């Protein structure tokens, strides 16, 4: 075991020194080549310090001199084995860029296997499995996966949010102490940060060193950035348990969810590229063109009427829609949000002949049919809860959790309840031609319990099992993860779903920020983005159709609007946007994401550049008014500097976003320039009205 493990991939390296009693991380950052030195991990031992000195332990414990947050907390009866001394007992390379390191503490009767993988895309994944090798029960309080940062780490960037305002950035200096985020929502949470980034001073979209992690789990969890007086910053991700929730019986194990980490020397876009490439390399990643969606929610809400929906289906077909999704309101008792959840039978009053007439109509028009479900939830006012009141998950003690949107959580840890939900969904998918489920989950899970004991962990895994089982039974059905908008956006749920709904807010201005930061980790093909009504239902802001369409184009595009009575002008412009999406979705869903560093926050330039540099699609949008008279020049990064490109504004062409229509420079005729020129000199942008945008297509010129 006298060696150094040098995992390499995608220009990054994770180096672990195994020569001492416990594994020490030498480096997480840029690739160092093949030869790395051991023995460089020792720091001077300060006066008034533990004899071990300060080292960047892979698995920090008090027994190896760590006085920060312990990676493992647990105990046996009477507080025995309260502190572990897990030392290296084995290591093996499991494949190129992958290794497992085993740590054992025979006296505490614990064994830990740390699984570390660095992929060819540069994605570092880590998880650990703890086994109780003793003869008594071991109460596990927490098991954290710490990821170190590197030289120059000076600032923390993470995200926060609320319903209709998910994934908004917040930034602060990295100081001594712990920046701790705890998410006790029983789901990922509206405020849950998609990533925790630590970077060099002033790191930006395109510049600076960045170490970012993501926790791939949809239940209670915490993230922390900790800097002690004696070390660099550690980013920790862990599941959060309630008291007594995880007790390992002799021989039992607990495995942490995956922690994902990416390093970039070129700002946040470098981190984004690692995540996008890795996600796109998965065998389960959606590979068919992402169909244009029409979702009925903001068009008709609960007001389900066959004739109306058939009119909507006809309008959708004329616009070029490819997937028609019937949202909430189709099942028994579901006339509003006070009743029916759990009664997964088509409502006989509203749908006397079942869903078949609508499904047939949609399919005859060449569109797929999708259906909304919320399988983890129940209303108290439902046949299923009248029959099984004990199927509501809660703390026991004769009470149920506080309500949220009139609903409770069905106890999926109870096998009978799980079987019932599975059987109903299985029947719906078997009896109807359904290509897509919008799988919703619309409340925080507080006080989750099964048989009086805490069960958030088990409930989360049971929900995962439910989706997995349905996928196995119906492998061609795609599933979207929705959770009051974007409250369950994480790589745990995305292991088993095909897209996420980023937010219930279809206001294009709000969506711009929500989608920019969701895209920091998720490629656009995994993120649902819809053109909503002219006046947004969740903010009452009114936006031009072209601005709404431009924002929606950079995702899995759809429409969520009653399009039966559009004006001719609206119809033509929306159909044009659908056409643009179909033309460019191949590029948007495979390209490299670029977010320019502009100095004026009133504007944003972002886009997707083809992997081979042959073309790019950018949006330039104004997010408000600017103190400056003109936007000035903006540079287009990511293109081949040696190639010449033709640059043209392709949308809008029927309406004007411009402040001064007569003076928009190169816009009417387009322009040819080299990639180098476009990046270094840039192009002067036209003056836009606030909350307007243009779509710029850049194609390598052949002449
Ligand atoms: C949630 C979803 C919405 C819609 C409604 C239906 O709020 O986020 O998109 O499906 O439920 O009740």
Image (spheres, rainbow, N blue to C red):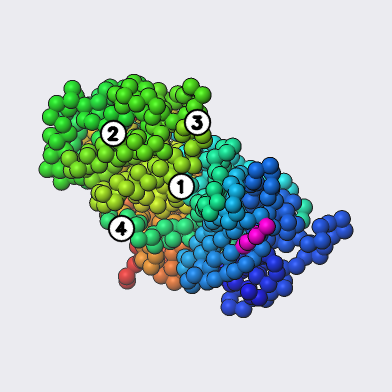
Q: CA distance from mark 2 to mark 3?
A: 34 Å
Horizontal side of 522 relative to 71 (left or right) equals: left
Circle 3/circle 4 CB separation < 8 Å? no
Which mark, residue 490?
1
Q: Which residue is mark 2?
A: 327
Q: Up-down: is 377 above or below 593?
A: above
Q: Secondary structure at mark 2?
A: loop
Using the image as rendered, state which of residue 504 and residue 332 is in the foreground.
332
Q: Up-down: is 111 above or below 310?
A: below
Q: CA distance from mark 4 to mark 2?
A: 25 Å
Using the image as rendered, state which of residue 558 and residue 91 is in the foreground.
91
Q: Which residue is mark 4?
A: 287
Which mark, residue 452?
3
* Mark 2 surroundings within 10 Å by alpha-carbon count, few (fewer than 14), some (14 through 19), many (20 or more): many
Residue closest to the far right = 47
Please check the rendered image and state whether residue 694 is part of the magenta-colored stretch, yes or no. Answer: no
């Amino acid at each position: 075991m006298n060696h150094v493990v040098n995992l390499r991939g995608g220009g990054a390296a994770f180096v672990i020194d195994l020569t001492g009693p416990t594994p020490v991380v030498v480096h997480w950052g840029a690739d160092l080549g093949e030869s790395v030195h051991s023995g460089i991990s020792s720091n001077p031992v300060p006066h008034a310090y533990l004899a071990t000195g300060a080292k960047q332990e892979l698995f920090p414990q008090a027994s190896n001199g760590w006085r920060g947050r312990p990676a493992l907390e647990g105990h046996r009866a009477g507080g025995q084995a309260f502190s572990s001394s897990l030392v290296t007992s084995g290591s093996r390379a499991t494949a190129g860029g992958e290794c497992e390191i085993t740590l054992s503490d025979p006296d505490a009767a614990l064994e830990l296997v740390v699984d570390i993988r660095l992929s060819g895309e540069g994605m570092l994944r880590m998880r650990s499995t703890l086994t109780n090798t003793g003869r008594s029960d071991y109460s596990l309080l927490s098991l954290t996966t710490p990821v170190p940062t590197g030289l120059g780490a000076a600032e923390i960037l993470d995200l926060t949010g609320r319903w209709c305002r998910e994934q908004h950035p917040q930034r602060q200096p990295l100081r001594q102490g712990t920046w701790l985020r705890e998410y006790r929502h029983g789901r990922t949470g509206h405020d849950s940060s998609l990533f925790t980034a630590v970077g060099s001073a002033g790191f930006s979209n395109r510049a600076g060193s960045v170490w970012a992690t993501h926790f791939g789990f949809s239940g209670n969890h915490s993230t922390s950035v900790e800097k002690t007086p004696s070390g660099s910053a550690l980013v920790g991700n862990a599941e959060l348990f309630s008291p007594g929730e995880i007790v390992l019986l002799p021989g039992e194990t607990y495995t942490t969810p995956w922690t994902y980490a990416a390093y970039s020397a070129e700002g946040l876009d470098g981190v984004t590229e690692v995540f996008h490439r890795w996600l796109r390399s998965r065998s389960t990643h959606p590979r068919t063109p992402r169909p244009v969606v029409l979702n009925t929610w903001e068009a008709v809400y609960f007001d389900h009427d066959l004739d109306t929906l058939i009119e909507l289906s006809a309008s959708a077909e004329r616009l070029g829609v490819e997937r028609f999704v019937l949202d909430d309101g189709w099942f028994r008792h579901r006339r509003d949000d006070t009743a029916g959840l759990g009664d997964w039978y088509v409502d006989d009053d509203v749908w006397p002949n079942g869903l078949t007439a609508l499904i047939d109509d949609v399919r005859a028009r060449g569109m797929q049919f999708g259906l909304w479900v919320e399988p983890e939830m129940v209303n108290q006012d439902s046949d299923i809860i009248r029959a099984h009141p004990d199927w509501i998950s809660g703390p026991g003690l004769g009470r149920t959790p506080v309500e949220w949107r009139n609903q409770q959580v069905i106890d999926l840890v109870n096998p009978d309840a799980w079987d019932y939900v599975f059987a109903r969904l299985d029947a719906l998918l078997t009896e109807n031609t359904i290509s897509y489920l919008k799988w919703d989950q619309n409340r925080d899970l507080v006080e989750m319990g099964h048989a009086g004991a805490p069960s958030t962990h088990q409930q989360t895994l049971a929900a995962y099992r439910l989706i997995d089982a349905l996928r196995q039974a119906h492998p061609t059905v795609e599933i979207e993860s929705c959770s009051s908008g974007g409250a369950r956006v994480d790589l745990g749920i995305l292991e088993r779903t095909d897209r996420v709904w980023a937010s219930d807010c279809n206001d294009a201005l709000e969506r711009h920020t929500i989608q920019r930061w969701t895209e920091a980790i998720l490629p656009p093909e995994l993120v649902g983005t819809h053109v909503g009504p002219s006046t947004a239902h969740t903010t009452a802001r009114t936006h031009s159709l072209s601005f709404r369409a431009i924002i929606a184009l950079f995702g899995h595009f759809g429409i969520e609007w009653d399009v039966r009575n559009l004006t001719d002008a609206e119809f033509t412009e929306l159909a044009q946007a659908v056409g643009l999406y179909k033309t460019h979705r191949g590029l948007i869903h495979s390209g490299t994401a670029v977010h320019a560093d502009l100095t004026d926050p009133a504007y944003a330039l972002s886009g997707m550049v083809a992997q081979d540099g042959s073309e790019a699609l950018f949006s330039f949008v104004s997010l408000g008014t600017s103190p400056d008279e003109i936007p000035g020049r903006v540079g287009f990064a990511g293109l081949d500097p040696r190639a010449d490109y033709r640059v043209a504004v392709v949308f809008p062409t029927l309406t004007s976003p411009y402040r001064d229509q007569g003076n928009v420079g190169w816009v009417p005729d387009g322009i040819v320039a080299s990639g180098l020129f476009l990046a270094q000199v840039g192009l002067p942008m036209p003056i836009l009205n606030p909350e307007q945008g243009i779509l710029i297509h850049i194609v390598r010129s052949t002449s």
